[in-house]
Structures are given as C-alpha cells and as structure tokens.
Image: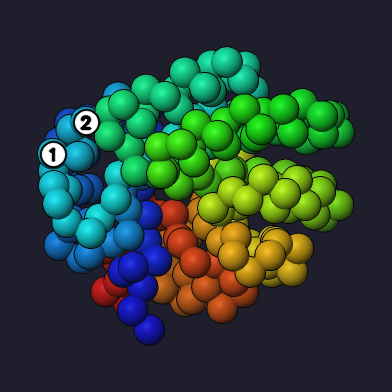
Amino acid sequence: MKLNRYIDHTVLKPTTTLEDIKILCMEAVEHDFAAVCIPPPFVKLAKTFVGSTTTKVATVTGFPFGYAAIEAKVAETVLAIVDGADEIDMVASILAIKNKDWAYLEKEIATIMPIIRNKGKVLKVIIESGILLEEEIIKCCELYARYQVDFVKTSTGYAEKGATVEAVALMRANLPANIQIKASGGIRTFDFAKELIDAGATRIGTSNGVALVKG
C-alpha cells in the first residue's frame, strides 16, 4: 500500500524555522505527498517551495485550542486564503463542545463555511476526538455533516491523546460517505497509519511522513 497521497506532511511546533519549512516542502514534493501543513506565517513561503506540484499547502486556524472568537477565526481564514493556502485545518471550539453549546458551534461553522466555499478551498474541522466522549464525537459528526465540510479531523497533536482507530471508525460510521476523515496525532508507523486508513481515514497528518512511506 502506498501512503504518499494520504499524507499531510506536518510541522506546527512554535519553534518552527524557515529551514524546517524548506525541508518539509522539499520532502513533500519529492515523495508526492497530498499536502504540507504548516503555521500560518509560512504559507506564502511554502507556496513558493511546492510551486505547481500536486502537493497542496494547508495551514491551521484557531490552533491549537479552538477557543479563539469566531471573528478571529474568520480573520485567520481570510488571511490564509489571501496568502495562498489551499486547505484550512480549523480547530472547532472545544470549550463549546464540552459545554454542549451546539448553537455556538453551528454559528461558527455557518460563518466560516461560506468563505471556504466562495474561494474553492478545503476545510478540515478538528474536533480533538481524544478528549471527547463518544456521544460528543457523534454530535460533531452530525453538525459538520449538515454543513458539508470536506473533512472532520481527529486531533491537533497537542492533546494528551491523538488519533485512534476507534475514533476514526466511529466518525466513519456517523459521517456521510462524501465527507472525509483526517487522522492526526501520534501517527509514527506505517502499520498504525494503515490501521487508520482501513478504519476510514483518507488523510494522515504526521511529522513523520518520510519514515511512513519508507515503511
């Protein structure tokens, strides 16, 4: 099984350097990864590194805790698109999920989604599945299915628990077939990545992409 087109080659640490971004992008292009996922200030630079290749540039908004105001997420989204991002990985308000404030979450996605669609971009909503109850994951799937997001994503990589096969399978069972799943957080081996894909993931977010494709 070839993993390369599943992989979002990722560096999101706060100490990320220009050289880190260059290496990440060069590796992604060399191995024909689906995307690089990088901090927002590096989007323009990453676009110059990947050029006209098939590797997309993804960045994050509301990262890593999701509790930025909706207006802040809108501003981050617009700026990322202006800078050239192809895909946006937005952290949902985890505070709202844990407090069962589904009206706020609906307002958040209803505000962001038209911006994404108007510009023909891809939205991945991060729900931080490792710290949610099963019923919370299911409610998230139901909400984001109504708004036809492109992906629901398991994790930021900053919570104590990242992607699990069980969470991906639960998400797959509660999302329509046209909405994809990105698994991320703690994916360091080919075997684990394959398990996640077999459970329903169609993207793998990892900083270990080169090692994964080499088996």
User: Visible in this render: residue 46?
Assistant: yes
Position of 113 with respect to 211 (left or right) is: right
Write down the quadrant of residue 91 in the picture.
top right
Q: Please say if 145 is above or below 131.
A: below
Q: Is residue 62 left or right of residue 147?
A: left
Callout count: 2
- The secondary structure type at the circle numbered 1 is helix
- The residue type indicated by label 2 comes to Lys
Q: Is residue 120 shown above or below 108?
A: below
Q: Circle 2 — which element?
A: helix
Picture disc at residue 44: 2
Q: Is residue 130 visible?
A: no
Q: Residues within 10 Å of mark 1 (few under 14, many from 20)?
A: few
Answer above or below: position of 87 versus 72. Answer: below
Q: According to the image, label 1 marks what residue?
A: 48
Instruction: State the image coordinates of residue 123 (x, y, percent, origin top left).
Output: 50, 44
Measuring 55% from the left and 67% from the top, which residue is drawn there? 201
Q: Quadrant of the N terminus?
A: bottom left
The residue lying at 48 percent from left, 76 percent from top is 194
State yes or no: discs 1 and 2 in contact (Cβ < 8 Å).
Answer: yes
Where residue 96 sits in the image (x, y, percent)?
Answer: 77, 29
- Return the mark for residue 165: none
Determine the residue positioned at 57% across, 37% down: 113
**Residue 212 location, x and y as percent?**
34, 68
* Residue 81 in which image quadrant: top left
Would you call the spot at circle 2 few (<14 residues within 10 Å), some (14-19), or many (20 or more)? some
Say what amino acid the circle numbered 1 marks: Thr
Question: Residue 208: where, in percent of width, then height?
Answer: 34, 57
Left or right: 129 as drawn, with respect to 22:
right
Task: Name, please, the residue furthest toward the bottom.
Answer: 1
Q: Quadrant where the C terminus lies?
A: bottom left
Q: Disc 1 versus disc 2: distance between alpha carbons? A: 7 Å
